[in-house]
Amino acid sequence: MQRILLVDDDDSTRKVLHLMLGQLGHEVTEARNGLEAVAQYDLAPADLVITDLVMPCMDGIETILKFKQRNPRPKIIAISGGGRFSADELLAMAKHLGAQQILVKPLTLEQISAAILQVSS
């Protein structure tokens, strides 16, 4: 079981992912954007951050950069369905900046489970 910080501005996406992660036995805290995520992490560091990339206040790219400055550094899975740029472009940028895994939304339980296993080994 890992402590996971789930960051997504879409309430329904966050709810579904929270349920999936709970089914996998993980402890999940949530944030609606990067600013909330950094504040949450400072209060209670997570083992893993799963972050959307297109969000208000602080987007996922900025969020990844902030988490790379933290100690301890969490593992990061970036997720995106796209926005002004395609999901592939955004996720490639996230990978380049330090996300260990990238996933295109919508996600399946199998995809998220496999990504968590890969970053945890």
Image (spheres, grey):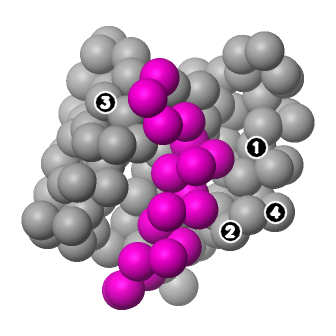
Q: Secondary structure at mark 1?
A: helix
Quarter the N terminus occupies: bottom left
What is the CA distance from the residue labelled 3 to the residue labelled 2?
Answer: 21 Å
What is the CA distance from the residue labelled 3 to the residue labelled 1?
Answer: 19 Å
Residue topped by disc 1: 91
The amino acid at mark 4 is: His
Question: For this view, does 120 lie left or right of residue 44?
Answer: right
**Residue 110 seen anywhere in this rendered image of the structure:** no
The amino acid at mark 3 is: Arg
Which quadrant holds residue 45?
bottom left
What residue appears at the point 39 percent right and 23 percent down from the top-left corner?
9
Which quadrant holds residue 60?
top right
Residue 67 within the segment the image draws in magenta: yes
What residue appears at the point 55 percent right and 36 percent down from the top-left corner?
59
Residue 2 within the segment the image draws in magenta: no
Q: Secondary structure at mark 3?
A: loop
What is the CA distance from the residue labelled 3 to the residue labelled 4?
Answer: 23 Å
Residue topped by disc 2: 98
Decide: few, some or many residues near mark 3? Use Cα within 10 Å; few <14, some 14-19, many ≥20: many
Residue topped by disc 3: 32
Disc 4 + disc 2, Cβ < 8 Å:
yes
